[in-house]
């Protein structure tokens, strides 16, 4: 019987490796090649968060001037009460000048950018509705008084919020809500959600590819902080912004607009993609965590180009990544099974230990699924444990034979 168990272990492992190889070959196959589309349209939105931190340095001025020289509009996310904006004369002069030229949208970025939730970092999550409503309403009114222009876009600090935040925005006259594609919250309100989906440090080649491949429309909401040019010099914010602007100017089918305008012009586009945005973000993190950079790159191409096959790639990619993790747990079972056998416990004790471990694993897995604080990497640990437990069930107990 012991020999049969060993044979079963190796047969199972061989089948698992074969399945993983087949999935990997399919992900690399021509099935997921990009499809040319000469009628393609691309829109790029530049979302510059926390502009109230404007330093006035020559480096940041050069960065912002790059957009002005090329007549590229930006959406500036401005916190109304973190600093006394009316004393920031240099910043207000810059923003009002760009606003007059049609190169600036002012978006409400929270209230004071406070953090009320510790490690989760949020100004709004868990706060009473009345408090959220008052903060959003007063912040909106403050910016409208300063800029003499309606504020239609809200961007929550730390890109985190709850359904009460959406409700408060809707009741305050906000029309567009923009956060991160990592944190989708059900939105039953008359509010257009248009989340960021691109970082300034991401390759501009994705925008070029989207300009000639995939579905009829691709929208890039580019996220960055202009003051970071002074802090993270090695990231070359200026160089990457210059390259992206060059791509925009070189292609007639690529246009630039503000976040509020684009979200209100293409409501169906964003409504249809909000679920996709979240799963692309999760799958990219999952595959990237396990060093599958080639798959992450291909997923990004499919997603940004709007290819129809992106959902299938996500499903197969998650199966492949989960299979790798499960296989790793199964292989880890070899030394663990050897250790368990060396303890020479009775079959009854082996079964008790395995049942206890399996019950604990099941409860923990349920907790990770229902608790939003756990992410996809946490769930992968459950998959790893599943592979380990299966190996132990196959290999032990042996003692009663």
Image (cartoon, grey):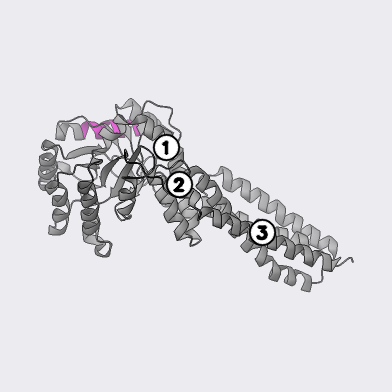
Determine which residue is flagged by label 1.
Answer: 273
Distance in Å between CA atoms under marks 2 and 3: 25 Å
Percent across and percent down for residue 31 are 50, 49
Whole-angstrom CA distance, mark 2 to mark 1, is 10 Å
Residue 216 in the image, given as x and y percentages of width and height: 35, 37
Taking the spot 72% from the left edge, 60% from the top edge, the residue there is 12
350 or 311, nearer to the observer: 311
Q: Secondary structure at mark 1?
A: helix
Mark closer to the chain start, 2 or 3: 3
Dominant secondary structure, magenta: helix
How far apart are the alpha carbons under marks 3 and 1? 33 Å
Provide the residue designation for mark 2.
280
Quadrant showing the C terminus: bottom right
Residue at screen point 45% across, 59% down: 294
Q: Could you say which quadrant of the image residue 42 lies in?
A: top left
Looking at the image, which residue is at 17% across and 55% down?
A: 60
Pointer 3 or 1: first along the chain = 3
């Amino acid at each position: 019987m012991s020999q049969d168990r060993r044979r079963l272990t190796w047969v199972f492992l061989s089948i698992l490796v074969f399945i993983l190889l087949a999935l990997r070959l399919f992900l690399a196959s021509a099935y997921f090649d990009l499809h040319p589309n000469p009628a393609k349209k691309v829109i790029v939105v530049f979302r510059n968060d926390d502009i109230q931190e404007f330093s006035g340095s020559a480096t940041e001025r050069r960065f912002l001037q790059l957009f002005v020289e090329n007549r590229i509009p930006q959406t500036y996310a401005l916190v109304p009460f973190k600093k006394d904006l009316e004393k920031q004369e240099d910043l207000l002069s810059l923003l009002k000048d760009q606003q007059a030229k049609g190169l600036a949208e002012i978006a409400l970025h929270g209230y004071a950018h406070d953090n009320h939730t510790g490690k989760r970092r949020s100004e709004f999550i868990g706060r009473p509705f009345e408090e959220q409503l008052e903060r959003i309403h007063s912040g909106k009114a403050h910016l409208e008084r300063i800029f003499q222009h309606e504020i239609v876009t809200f961007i929550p600090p730390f890109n985190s919020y709850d359904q009460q935040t959406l409700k408060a925005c809707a009741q305050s006259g906000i029309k567009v809500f923009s956060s991160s594609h990592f944190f989708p919250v059900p939105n039953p309100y008359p509010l257009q959600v248009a989340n960021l989906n691109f970082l300034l440090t991401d390759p501009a080649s994705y925008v070029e590819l989207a300009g000639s491949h995939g579905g009829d429309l691709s929208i890039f909401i580019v996220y960055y902080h202009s003051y970071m040019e002074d802090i993270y010099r090695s990231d070359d914010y200026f160089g990457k912004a210059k390259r992206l602007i060059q791509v925009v100017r070189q292609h007639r089918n690529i246009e630039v607009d503000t976040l509020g305008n684009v979200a209100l012009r293409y409501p169906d586009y964003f409504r249809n993609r909000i679920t996709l945005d979240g799963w692309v973000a999760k799958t990219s993190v999952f595959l990237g965590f396990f060093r599958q950079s080639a798959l992450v790159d291909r997923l990004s191409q499919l997603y940004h180009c709007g290819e129809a096959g992106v959902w299938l790639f996500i499903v197969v990619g998650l199966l492949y990544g989960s299979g790798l993790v499960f296989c790793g747990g199964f292989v880890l079972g070899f030394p663990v099974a050897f250790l368990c056998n060396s303890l020479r416990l009775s079959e009854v004790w082996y079964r008790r230990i395995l049942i206890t471990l399996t019950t604990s694993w099941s409860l923990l897995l349920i907790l990770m699924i229902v608790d939003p604080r756990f992410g996809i990497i946490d769930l992968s640990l459950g998959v790893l444990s599943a592979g380990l437990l299966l190996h132990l069930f196959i290999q032990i107990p042996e003692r009663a034979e």
